[in-house]
Image: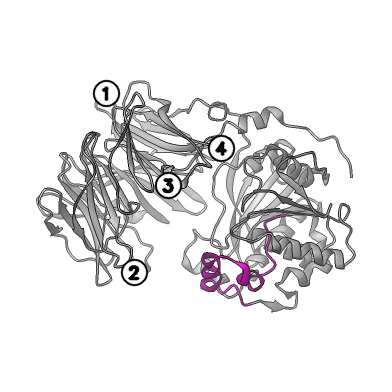
């Protein structure tokens, strides 16, 4: 099949300006933020957001630029911002201070990467680090007091929960930690001056965790899990020793996560997820009332912080809110929401294909799917079913370069989260333990049949990566009539076949999720090699030569079996092994994105002269 394919040079030139933020962190006051950014061209640099000014802005951090292929021990893995624009870089072997003008100064060494990083609550150049011991689980506290003085050890700490807590005073002398003892979490005040630890005087409640603090008032927001481990009971500890129940949130359905507490108390930003609905809300602690922030619906939420405008008004900041948009900095105040773009073409663009969450039929009830495209899937020219990796993973309302390239080619993507996906409760996820490609594959096939019926019987294209590629190949064999074409990125043949050649981490995941058990039923075994003879749709298999998760040998074995079955390379199937690529071989490649989009949209497959692609089997 041939067709005139619309090339997308303008789209890709815009996509190429996307910033891949490897880290993101606010200053102690929320008036500054910084990120380490990969530019897609082999370099690592930093961006700094000035959020306390009348006109917030983003700039590149002067003096922070590294070649990504440089010595790993020299590359920073985190960056701490200060209100004046200075940055402290955290590397594997040392700390490095960058002044606002880019001048560098060594700041000492930590014995291991920190599990907690707490910049001073007043935004000044001071940072508390918590470092975990390698064997015992016990921790130690370290303080960097500012330029000219190296980081120093404060003292030993017991085993800690590496999240929650915060400063209890504006001077940065007391910090609330969540100590783990006897299977319980015990909020504890740590005094940096004396090393003393004092248990926070709160009533004992199962799962009690200090989640956020307000250093100017000394208040602590406590989160207590419900009996099923998924509740959202909130309580407020006050400096007079009293604890007050927050009742307003108890009427909210779904999962309620406190994102940030105003440093002056009184306001808590909440992320409420009642799948597929998500929204942001504000808890006013003084009146015990909850009101919506009227955020975009649906929304995806990243890190958040409260700050104050120059006039003293409260403002909530978050990185990444909205559907079908690249990560962006947004703020909410009394005037509503507004954006602060990062200066890139991608950040300024407003023409992206929209995304939304939609409920669709699975095999035994509705499941959630992310839908992305310029056209409604019922009437779109073409539809692709996209399957996520994992299996302990899920699609979220996160910007996807591939989905945008597909949308530009007239393709609408439906990306389901079948049973076994994370994010819908442990019981939902555990359904695939010992039953890979059981309930999840049944959901995929049920959804595909529904979509095809709703589109008048038009066949669908199928895309999957990693575990999703495994599912896609099985779906193509078990129900070959559903699919017009199939594209698999980094597939494996079965959990049992992957286990002997996988890394220790992947083997542990396979064992934990019972992946070595091969399900067999009337549809046959969940082994790709057993299903290959039944696949009739044109097939493309892509694999990174240096894939550390799923070795490229899995695809080579698949190709060997296709040849044995008499399938013709270059006609019935195509196989590309991408030189020097890892588990996500499409990343950063305009050529590969367009090749994939052309195949899924039109069935065309042509390999241009791509230096990074080695041909095999086509």
Label whose residue precedes the other's in the sequence (2 or 1)? 2
Q: CA distance from mark 1 to mark 4?
A: 39 Å
Magenta segment range? 488-517
> Badge 2: how crowded within 10 Å, few (<14), some, or many (20+)?
few
Secondary structure beneath label 4: loop
For label 2, the SS is loop
Q: Nearer the viewer, mark 1 or mark 4?
A: 4
User: Looking at the image, is mark 2 or mark 4 earlier in the sequence?
Assistant: 4
Q: Position of residue 506 (x, y in %)?
A: 55, 65
In front here: 5 or 609?
609
Point out which mark residue 227 bears.
2
Image position of 517 (left or right of 155) = right
On the image, numbered disc 1 is attached to which residue? 310
Query: What colour scheme governs how the chains and residues are painted in the rendered image of this protein?
Result: one colour
Alpha carbon separation for disc pair 2 and 4: 48 Å
Q: Which mark is residue 42?
A: 4
Q: For marks 3 and 4, give the one nearer the viewer.
A: 3
Q: Residues within 10 Å of mark 4 (few under 14, many from 20)?
A: few
Q: Which mark is residue 73?
A: 3
């Amino acid at each position: 099949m041939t067709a005139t394919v619309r090339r997308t040079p303008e789209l890709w030139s815009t996509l190429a300006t996307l910033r891949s933020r490897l880290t993101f962190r606010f200053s102690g006051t929320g008036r500054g933020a910084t990120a380490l950014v990969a530019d897609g061209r082999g370099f690592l640099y930093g961006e700094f957001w000035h959020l306390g000014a009348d006109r917030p802005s983003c700039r590149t951090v002067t003096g922070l630029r590294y070649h990504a292929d440089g010595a790993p021990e020299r590359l920073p893995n985190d960056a701490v911002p200060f209100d004046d624009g200075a940055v402290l870089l955290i590397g594997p072997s040392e700390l490095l201070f960058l002044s606002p003008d880019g001048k560098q100064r060594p700041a000492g060494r930590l014995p291991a990467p920190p599990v907690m990083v707490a910049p001073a609550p007043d935004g000044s150049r001071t940072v508390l680090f918590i470092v975990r011991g390698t064997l015992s689980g016990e921790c130690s506290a370290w303080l960097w007091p500012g330029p000219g003085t190296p980081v120093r050890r404060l003292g030993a700490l017991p085993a800690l929960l590496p999240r929650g807590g915060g400063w209890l005073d504006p001077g940065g002398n007391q910090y609330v930690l969540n100590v783990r003892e006897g299977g319980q979490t015990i909020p504890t005040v740590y005094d940096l001056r004396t090393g003393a630890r004092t248990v926070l005087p709160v009533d004992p409640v199962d799962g009690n965790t200090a989640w956020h603090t307000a250093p100017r008032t000394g208040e602590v927001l406590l989160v207590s899990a419900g009996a099923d481990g998924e509740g959202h009971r909130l309580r407020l500890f006050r400096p007079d020793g009293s604890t007050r129940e927050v009742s307003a949130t108890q009427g909210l359905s779904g999962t309620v996560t406190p994102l940030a507490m105003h440093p002056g108390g009184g306001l808590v930003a909440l992320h409420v997820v009642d799948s597929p609905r998500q929204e942001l809300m504000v808890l006013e602690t003084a009146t015990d009332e909850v009101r919506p922030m009227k955020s975009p619906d649906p929304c995806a939420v990243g890190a958040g912080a409260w700050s104050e405008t120059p006039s003293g008004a409260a403002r909530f900041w978050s990185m990444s809110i909205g559907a079908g948009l690249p990560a962006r900095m947004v703020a909410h105040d009394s005037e509503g929401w507004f954006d602060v773009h990062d200066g890139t073409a991608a950040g300024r663009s407003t023409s992206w294909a929209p995304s939304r969450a939609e409920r669709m039929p699975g095999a035994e009830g509705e499941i959630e799917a992310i839908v992305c495209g310029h056209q409604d899937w019922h009437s779109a020219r073409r539809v692709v079913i996209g399957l996520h990796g994992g299996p302990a993973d899920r699609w979220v309302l996160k910007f996807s370069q591939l989905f945008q390239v597909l949308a530009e080619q007239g393709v609408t993507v439906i990306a389901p989260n079948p049973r076994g996906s994370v994010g819908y409760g442990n019981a939902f996820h555990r359904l695939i333990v010992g039953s890979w490609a059981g309930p999840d594959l049944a959901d995929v096939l049920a959804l595909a049949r529904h979509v095809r019926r709703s589109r008048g019987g038009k066949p669908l294209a199928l895309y999957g990566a990693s575990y999703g590629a495994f599912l896609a190949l099985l779906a193509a064999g078990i129900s070959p009539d559903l699919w017009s074409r199939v594209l698999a990125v980094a597939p494996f043949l079965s959990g049992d076949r992957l286990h002997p050649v996988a890394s220790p981490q992947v083997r542990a995941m396979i064992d934990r999720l019972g992946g070595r058990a091969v399900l067999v039923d009337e549809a046959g075994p969940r082994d790709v090699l057993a299903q290959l003879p039944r696949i009739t749709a044109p097939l493309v298999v892509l694999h990174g030569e240096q894939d550390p998760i799923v070795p490229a040998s899995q695809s080579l074995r698949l190709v060997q079996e296709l040849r044995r079955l008499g399938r013709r390379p270059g006609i019935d199937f195509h196989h590309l092994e991408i030189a020097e690529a890892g588990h996500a071989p499409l990343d950063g490649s305009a050529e590969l994105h367009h090749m994939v989009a052309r195949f899924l949209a039109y069935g065309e497959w042509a390999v241009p002269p791509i230096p990074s692609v080695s041909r095999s089997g086509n």
